[in-house]
Image (spheres, rainbow, N blue to C red):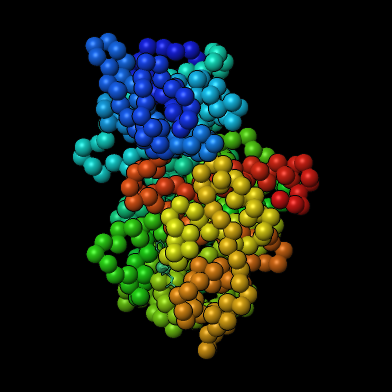
């Protein structure tokens, strides 16, 4: 499919973007108010040679922003593909004009292309009947013939990174397991300006990465820590991006129950976010100093598996009682956080599908973020604009006692389930070097969409890939202008 911009062309479909209270945006058509509601998709089919008209509702005009536009574009992509049309005109110019400066034309072009491409995604490689992708030309009608080629090129890189994250996350565990993930990462980054280093069983043992080694005990696959380094400016303070990569969380010996626990393959969402971001970053001109650390294992029950009451010791001197083998994420993240400290990272963001509890607190659209206030603020602001939303959560010192163990320094589960996402963050904090500014993002609630909506298809969302890539850009800019320091 080709995306073009410029004056109006002939096409099968004309798309109009309709915020509420925007007068009558479509000539010769009387729109009902419901057609302008957020998410509304209405067809007016043309007769003979007439173009078909697609009306997209954007909701209250005051709340229209780039994210609403991405959402509408995702909905439009699915609707047009479903009808099987080949060429599309999107009336961006009149929409941008009606918004009176809320969005520039370039912002609208980027947002539309991003939403459309992400919304066209389908993980259908295992279906014998693929979902049709019929659109050949997507033409964005603009006020001039100005070129948006670079913007569209950057958008393509962005969406391909996010779709890489989705692909990895969606892939079932018979294809993607700890060992094949390592190979897939090597392959993806082979031609990129990224150094790939994999710590296998022996190196993990040498470095005392006992969380990974313990969790992986019940698996037929070896665990690994994947270290990806992107360093185009060694003078910048090192930023570490840490991802939880449990390729399947069966719960271990505290085996998960349920009629269908297929979603446990999404437990690598954090590492997918990091890998997706690195995919984007490594195709950009960014001047930065970044290391990605992916903690890879699966969590299986087996005769050799670790059992509850096992004690794991870490090289920072802490011992952990495994109260429950299903709280495995924090055990492997501890290794990666300690490793970030060893590498001398000054800032570290860890991202993980860590607790079911985060969804109790924040619902299914907004991830939770703990740690350094300034960095959380920066991340929150980025998420508000790019759609990977998160919200600040507290590190409650009073809850430290919930980590208490009778015979080790700490337990991997608290005795009560209230505040479980906070307690998990407190657990991780104990593995963060004092020299590092740290943020923990729990994305267990945003890793997947149960049904298609906006630019999310059903399945893995790719959450966090755009967030971390944009954050890396913002940190590099801050380092350049302020010489580092404040976020
Ligand atoms: N990967 C899960 C968290 C999770 C739950 C992700 C639901 C996505 C959807 C994690 O390893 C886990 O099992 N956490 C337990 C912790 C508990 C045993 C303290 C949980 O949240 O129930
Ligand atoms: Zn678990
Ligand atoms: Zn897990």
Taking 229 as reference, is 9 left or right? left
Report x, y in % for residue 463. Answer: 47, 49
Q: Quadrant of residue 14?
A: top left
Relative to 359, say whether 452 is above or below: above
Residue projecting furthest to the left: 128
Which image quadrant shows ligand 2?
Answer: bottom left
Residue projecting furthest to the right: 483
Residue at image location 38% in from the left, 32% down from the top: 33
Relative to 280, say whether 135 is above or below: above
Q: Name the residue nearer the viewer: 224 or 47.
A: 47
Report x, y in % for residue 383. Answer: 56, 47
Residue at image location 42% in from the left, 47% down from the top: 461
Relative to 242, say whether 11 is above or below: above
Q: Is the N terminus in the top left, top right, bottom left or bottom right quadrant?
A: top left
Residue 73 in view, yes or no: yes
Residue 338 in view, yes or no: no
Q: Name the residue nearer the viewer: 183 or 15.
A: 15
Report x, y in % for residue 382. Answer: 59, 45
Residue at image location 61% in from the left, 72% down from the top: 396
Residue at image location 51% in from the left, 47% down from the top: 388
Report x, y in % for residue 179. Answer: 40, 56
Total numbered labels placed on residues in the image: 0
Taking 46 as reference, is 484 left or right? right
Q: Quadrant of residue 2?
A: top left
Q: Name the residue nearer the viewer: 243 or 132.
A: 132
Taking 22 as reference, is 231 left or right? right
């Amino acid at each position: 499919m080709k995306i073009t911009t410029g004056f109006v062309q002939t096409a099968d479909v004309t798309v109009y973007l309709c915020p509420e209270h925007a007068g009558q945006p479509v000539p010769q058509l009387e729109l009902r108010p419901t057609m302008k509601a957020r998410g509304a998709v209405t067809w007016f089919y043309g007769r003979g040679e007439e173009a078909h008209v697609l009306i997209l509702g954007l909701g209250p005009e005051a709340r229209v922003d780039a994210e609403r536009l991405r959402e509408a574009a995702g909905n439009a992509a699915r609707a047009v593909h479903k009808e099987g049309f080949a060429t599309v005109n999107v009336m961006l110019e009149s929409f941008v004009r009606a918004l009176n400066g809320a969005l520039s034309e370039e912002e609208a072009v980027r947002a539309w292309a991003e939403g459309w491409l992400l919304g066209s995604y389908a993980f259908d490689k295992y279906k014998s009947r693929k979902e049709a992708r019929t659109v050949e030309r997507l033409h964005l009608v603009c006020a001039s013939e100005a070129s948006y080629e670079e913007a569209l090129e950057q958008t393509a890189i962005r969406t391909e990174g996010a779709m890489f994250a989705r692909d990895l996350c969606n892939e079932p565990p018979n294809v993607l397991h700890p060992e094949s993930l390592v190979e897939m990462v090597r392959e993806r980054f082979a031609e990129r300006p990224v150094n790939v280093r994999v710590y296998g069983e022996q190196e993990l043992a040498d470095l005392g990465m006992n969380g990974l080694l313990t969790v992986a005990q019940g698996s037929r696959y070896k665990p690994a820590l994947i270290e990806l380094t992107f360093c185009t400016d060694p003078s910048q303070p090192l930023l570490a991006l840490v991802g939880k990569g449990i390729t399947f969380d069966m719960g271990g010996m505290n085996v998960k129950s349920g009629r269908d626990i297929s979603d446990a393959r999404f437990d690598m969402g954090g590492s997918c976010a990091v890998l997706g971001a690195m995919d984007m970053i490594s195709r950009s001109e960014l001047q930065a100093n970044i290391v990605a650390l992916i903690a890879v294992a699966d969590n299986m029950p087996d005769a050799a598996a670790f059992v509850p009451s096992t004690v794991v010791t870490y090289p920072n001197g802490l011992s952990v009682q495994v109260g429950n083998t299903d709280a495995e994420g924090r055990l492997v993240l501890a290794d990666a956080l300690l490793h970030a400290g060893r590498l001398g990272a000054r800032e570290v963001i860890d991202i993980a599908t860590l607790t079911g509890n985060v969804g109790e607190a924040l619902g299914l659209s907004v991830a939770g973020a703990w740690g350094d206030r300034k960095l959380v603020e920066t991340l929150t602001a980025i998420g508000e604009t790019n759609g990977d939303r998160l919200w600040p959560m507290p590190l409650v010192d009073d809850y430290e006692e919930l980590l208490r163990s009778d015979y080790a320094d700490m337990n991997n589960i608290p005795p009560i389930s209230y505040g479980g996402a906070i307690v998990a963050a407190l657990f991780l904090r104990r593995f963060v070097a004092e020299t590092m500014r740290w943020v923990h993002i729990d994305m267990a609630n945003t890793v997947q969409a149960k049904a298609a909506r906006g630019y999310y298809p059903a399945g893995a969302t790719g959450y966090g890939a755009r967030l971390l890539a944009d954050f890396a850009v913002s940190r590099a800019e801050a380092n350049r202008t302020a010489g580092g320091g404040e976020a």
